[in-house]
Amino acid sequence: MSACVPTRASDPDRADVPTAAARKAHSPPPPPRRRFRIAGADVSASIAVFLIALPLSLGIALATGAPLESGLVAAAVGGLVVGLFGGAPLQVSGPAAGLTVVTAELIQRYGWRTTCAITVLAGIAQLGLGCLRVARTALAVSPAVVHGMLAGIGITIAVAQLHIVLGGTPESAVLDNVVALPAQLADAQPAALGVSALTLTVLFAWPRIPGRAGRLTRKVPAALVAVTSATVVTALSGLTLPEVDLPSWSSHALAGLPDGPVLGIAAAVLTTTLVCSVQSLLGAVATDKLASARPDLPPKTRRSNLDRELLGQGAANIVSGSLGGLPVAGVAVRSATNVNAGGVSRNSTMLHGVWVVAATALLVPVLEMIPLASLAALVMAVGLQMVSLHHIRTVTRHREVLVYIVTTLGVVALGVLQGVGLGVAVAVAVALHRLARTRITHEEDTHGAHHVRVRGQLTFLAVPRLSRVLHQVPQGGKCVVELDGSFMDHAAYEALQDWEKSHTAQGGQVELTGRGGHRITEPASHSCCRPWTPWRNHHCDRPSAAARETERENETAEPRRGGHQLASGISAFQRNTAPLVRDELARLAREGQQPTQLFLTCADSRLVTSMITSSGPGDLFVVRNVGNLVPLPGAESGDDSVAAAIEYAVDVLKVRSITVCGHSGCGAMQALLSSPPTGSGALTPLKRWLRHGMPSLERMADKGLPWARLAGRAPADTAEQLCLTNVVQQLEHLRAHESVAEALRQGALELHGMYFHVGEAQAYLLEEPDPVFGEVAATSFDDSDVTATTRA
């Protein structure tokens, strides 16, 4: 969709608009000067995120072997840069545990300055991917591969940090760490082990404090309490342990020129780009799910623009790498904290970055008191949590545990890029195996009927087995063929059809059924009725040539009646569509209707609401009338059907949004322009109804209000301008209804305006106008989200 953005524009054609006295009731007050304000919820949420990000950033830097201040640099850049330019307003970015293994390997192989240069190049690559708008392609990766990658990284982190917890130093490779672990256990340092145990005890016990005290204490992040407790105990007990060492910023190492083999650097950039991008995009989707559960958030905040998020992540990695920081990616823990703490905009993410900068400048003496063993224990716990039992149960239930295990072991033994490559290869192999794996059985019941059951996808690979089983059915016998799959290719369809014709020609009976035993006349996958086949002269039953000739002769003698077309359409529905939707409609019949939207649109026959909104049965409560009008309460109309539908939808069905949809070429708007209904004399029913559109006509004639623009262009003519104005006017009429006004006050309802250009098949979505400032935000859902705000 493209944006429908009302803007100030003068148009010489406005002189042709019928003049009328402007009504102040239909004109919003002039907008006051807007001031930059930060919501209190964003401030409190940013503090909660900062308290988690500070210890984790230091711990992740420790785990990678990078300078500790590099974690703080990445946290600050992730908050400020991604918060400002990213497409996921509530996602918090910074140094992520999922990047620990990749970064540690790069530091070991190329050194810190070259690693920073690789981070910069990865950011440039992310900018390129964002410009190509391929962000959603990353979501095509099997979840089993992603979860396996995170689990492998988590195991690698936990094994490496275990050495620091025991008072030792980790090796560079995970297998070397495993081999050296028995000797490290034998030589464990009691002081380091005690501090680490205290950190882990507080970390896991703090969220489980019961009662009212627990509800109060949970407002303070467990990670901060755990590290603070370990620091205080270490200082009071006089233990001598390695502590955080933040060197002077004057000696801080920045990025240098890449130093190493070209192929090796390219592979490193590819790996960093892949892990950063996938983790950030999946994190944005997860954050959207959390945000959708909060009705107080505006729609723009609930839905992420993934391409813009990729651009923001790329810019952050360029800045972080240039300033000597770790790679940046979206972090699930901090993002969930931001949403749950009440963040309402990207200001909370940016403020958390400001707090990190302030802490880096003012709290260096405090940070240098933290024992490294405490940070190692914290990061080890984060690594273990990345091996999620919930994810394991999910992939097991979907029979993808092999993909998960191969990816995990590949990441642990070979590295992130190699492990992910193995996982993708296994995922493709499993998908092909499922596509080719078809189970075909044959049995005879007590009544002599033969049952052939096909389980799985029916492709050309299964045709030999299908033919062999079908020919086991004796000539002249009755056979029921049950197809329990979602796909049948052409070869399988022809084999089944040829056998059916041959068997029935020899006196046999054949019945084809789908999943659940519902009878069908032909395999559903070969229906000639494709989605949105042109309606005119549309037939799914495609008669033979002789039948078509006879039909033409009959039409010459007597014009074809609409009843035949209606009966033909019903027959096609029963034959092709009913078997596919019967289960879903049965569920809706049991549960009753529970739509989430009231869709009020014109009665124009060219508007197919389910097609425009990609909705199905039970999704929309639709009200249609001439001109998509909403009469004001108490208005003289003689028809309360619209008000009754609004009251029923809001008070009984509890819909969460109401959309008023206008369209191009609206006959009602053209009638208003050509001959506005006036006076109180004898009016036809149509003209009496169109009197509810007069406020729209007067609104458009008001020279104090601007005209709308469609995606940067002026409306094609006065009729199109009236169609747009009418949508905004009917939204104001909606607010006058008592049930709507009450739901809006409670925050349980949203109002939206929409305009559909029939000739261009283009939809324009207008969000709810501000009742105080009279503003309309237009959001484009074409390939990216673009928001503009102007007066209505």
Image (cartoon, grey):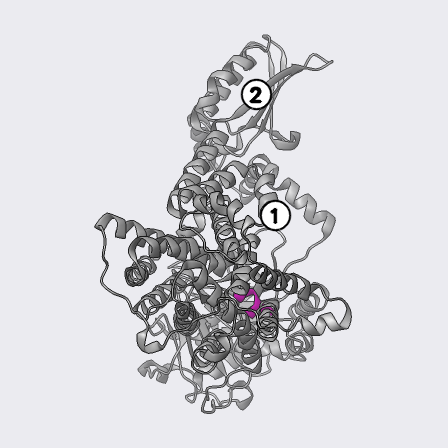
On the image, the x and y values in percent for residue 364 come to 45, 78
Task: Tell me where the magenta segment starts and ends, as one range.
Answer: 334-340
341, above or below 446, in the image: below
Disc 2 crowd rating (10 Å Cα; few below 14, some 14-19, many 20+) is some
95, above or below 518, in the image: below
Viewer-closest of 122 and 126: 122
Image mark for residue 389: 1
Horizontally, residue 703 falls left or right of residue 604, namely left
On the image, the x and y values in percent for residue 50 come to 52, 74
On the image, the x and y values in percent for residue 736 come to 63, 80
Q: Quadrant of residue 731?
A: bottom right
On the image, the x and y values in percent for residue 201 come to 65, 62
Q: CA distance from mark 1 to mark 2?
A: 35 Å
Image mark for residue 160: none
Q: Quick one: SS at disc 2?
A: strand
Image mark for residue 440: 2
Viewer-closest of 181 and 140: 181
Residue occupying the point 48% across, 31% down: 435
1 or 2: tag closer to the N-terminus: 1
Predominant secondary structure in magenta? helix
Horizontally, residue 260 falls left or right of residue 584, namely left
Viewer-closest of 187 and 569: 187
Query: Which residue is farthest right?
Result: 211
Between circles 1 and 2, the one closer to the viewer is 1
Q: Is residue 121 magenta?
A: no
Q: Quadrant of residue 193?
A: bottom right
